[in-house]
Amino acid sequence: MFMPYARAVATSASQSRIQQLIEERVKPDADKAAIDKRIWDIFGERWAVMFTDLSGFSRRVSQFGIIHFLQTIYESLRILTPCIESHDGIMLKVEADSMMVIFRRPDLALECSIAMQQSLKQYNANIVPEEQILLCVGLGYGDMLRIGDEDVFGPEVNAASKLGEDTAKAWEILVTENFKSALQKRPGSGFQRLDEAPPGAEAAYKLLYQLT
């Protein structure tokens, strides 16, 4: 008998609450600074965020068709989801060949990224080239607005999205300046600064690591 009330509370704490506050913010006499503070008080959290993409995916869909598309999506989720779960990641979105995942700790996000690449290397060793899964990863870290388990918003989110979905090539793990600064030193790896940084990041780097 408590479910309707619980559902109302859960809804008001996410989508409907942010919608209400934004509606207040657009009014001509709105105190935007006060409303912004309320939004950050309710939704502001610090997370590491990961965006993934599959290299050459659109080209291969065009070449091999929609069934190949579905197979690749299924196989990538089957292989990568256990890596995310074992590194305490929370998958917020899956859109076509891309995933958005958040982690409380940047080091876990980085270790998860490497584990994902290693899992795919093992998988690809046993299949034909046209069915191989080639992963690109972008990582950011900082304060962001988390709207329930649906989405996150912030400069580091935008930067990580750009790195993972547009900039990174197959097997690459790219990170923002904030993400790199929050990490502990990791034996056997380093970073190479990129010539350009995406909007929302002061700088960006490619992780130099051994893919065993």
Image (cartoon, rainbow, N blue to C red):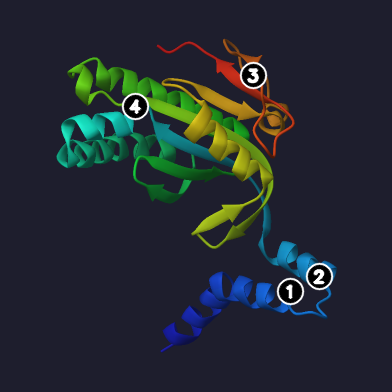
Residue 8 located left or right of residue 43: left
Residue denoted by label 4: 56
Real-space CA distance between mark 1 and mark 3, rounded to the nearest whole angstrom: 38 Å
Local SS, label 3 = loop
Q: Looking at the image, do the residues carrying marks 1 and 2 touch, with CB atoms under 8 Å apart?
A: yes
Q: CA distance from mark 2 to mark 3?
A: 37 Å
Q: Indicate left or right for 63 with 80 as reference.
A: left
Query: CA separation, marks 4 and 2?
Result: 44 Å
Q: Is tag 1's residue or tag 2's residue first in the polypeptide sequence? A: 1
Q: CA distance from mark 1 to mark 2?
A: 6 Å
Q: Which residue is mark 2?
A: 32
Locate the C terminus by quadrant: top left
Residue 87, given in percent of the width and then of the height, sits at 48, 37
The residue at the point 49 percent across, 44 percent down is 101
Which disc is residue 194 wearing?
A: 3
Residue 53 in sight here: yes
Asked if the residue under mark 4 is in contact with the one under mark 3, i.e. CB atoms within 8 Å, the reply is: no
Identify the residue at image location x=50%, y=25%: 168
Q: Let me know if residue 105 appears in the view.
A: no
